[in-house]
Image (spheres, helix red, strand yellow):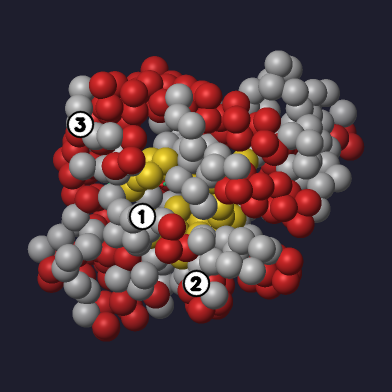
Amino acid sequence: MYNIFPLIRFPLNSAPSFGLWKVNNDTCADQVYNAIRTGYRLLDGACDYGNEKEAGEGVARAIKDGLVKREDLFIVSKLWNSFHDKEVVEKTAKKQLSDWGVDYFDLFIIHFPISLKYVDPSVRYPPGWKDENDKFTLGKATIQETWTEMEKLVQKGLAKSIGISNFSAQLIMDLLRYAKIPPATLQIEHHPYLVQAGLVKYAQENDITVTAYSSLGPASFLELDMKDAHRAAPLLDHATVKTIASKHGRTPAQVLLRWATQRGIAVIPKSNNQGRLQQNLEVTGWDLEPDDLRAISALDQGLRFNDPLAVSAAFRFLNRSL
Ligand code: NAD
């Protein structure tokens, strides 16, 4: 077993990072270009976001205009659930590389530890959670099968490093039994309402960099009109967060992001507002006090917005009613 973690050129928890979920196809190329011009270097994409071609166009333009070279960027993408079968992992990664217009990913991640039935890209791409008959159908691949194929991507130079997302500690314990290349990173929903302290500690103790997504909590899921997000008190307006922000002369968003980065957790926020884009870059190089960190962590409610179990339960219910 060998650890490829040192191969990652950026310390993930300080790389200026831009997430691509819900970035519209119409504006994606411009947003990526502008993020790079503003100083972002890590781009967090995925097949499921449906905008890899456009993200690649933004990258190509930034390289053509001399803003960056390919090797200055850290491009992350993810393997979707319906591409877990061993026969399709490499061909899917190659399609995604071709969409981006690059010949390697810096990091390629298993998006969810859930194998869904294969859907041919000619039928629907990205396939989302449903098969070609619009039903939720599990696939047959185990995580071990998929991870072994992910390791081959590193050996073939298609990915510099590989990682996992939305995994529990128990699944990681199992994965580490057979992994020849341990995951470089674990990407999870992480905000003050979902701290997952045990999982974060376990990953960090095993040299797996934790990357937080949806760091601003309910804000991201309001866009999806999720009931739980409407019910939750907005973190950006929370009295605890606002008091700490005014004490440090920072915005609530910066406090939420710094709360993560100061604890060694990478963040990948997204905004198409220039002011927010700029402020989200300033989340290292200044410190919250230990009491601030404790007060924010104490907001934990175990409140998960992105719950694959809820998605799969909803679809299983739907399958029965069809
Ligand atoms: P986010 O934290 O980036 O953004 C949430 C909302 O906050 C957005 O509407 C944004 O416009 C707004 N916002 C951003 N900066 C702000 C600021 N400074 N002040 C006020 N509002 C601000 O949440 P997200 O999009 O859920 O997550 C970030 C990235 O994580 C995604 O783009 C994606 O790359 C990744 N992600 C991964 C998974 C996964 O399953 N692995 C799931 C969700 C997201």
Amino acid of disc 1: Arg
Circle 1 Cα neighbour tier, 10 Å, few/some/many (<14 / 14–19 / ≥20): some
Q: Quadrant of the N terminus?
A: bottom right
Name the element at disc 1: loop
Name which of mark 3 and mark 1 comes first in the sequence.
1
Amino acid of disc 3: Leu
Label 2, label 1: how many angstroms apart (C-alpha)?
15 Å
Q: Which residue is mark 1?
A: 9
Q: Which residue is mark 3?
A: 67
Name the element at disc 3: loop
Ligand 1 placement by image quarter:
top left
Residues tagged 3 and 1 counted as in contact (Cβ below 8 A)? no
Please name the residue shown 33% across and 40% down the image.
71
* Residue 2 drawn above or below residue 42: below
Please name the residue shown 72% across and 53% down the image.
148
Name which of mark 2 and mark 3 comes first in the sequence.
3
Amino acid of disc 2: Asp
Q: Which residue is mark 2?
A: 207
Residues tagged 2 and 1 counted as in contact (Cβ below 8 A)? no
Name the image quarter holding residue 139: top right
Name which of mark 2 and mark 1 comes first in the sequence.
1
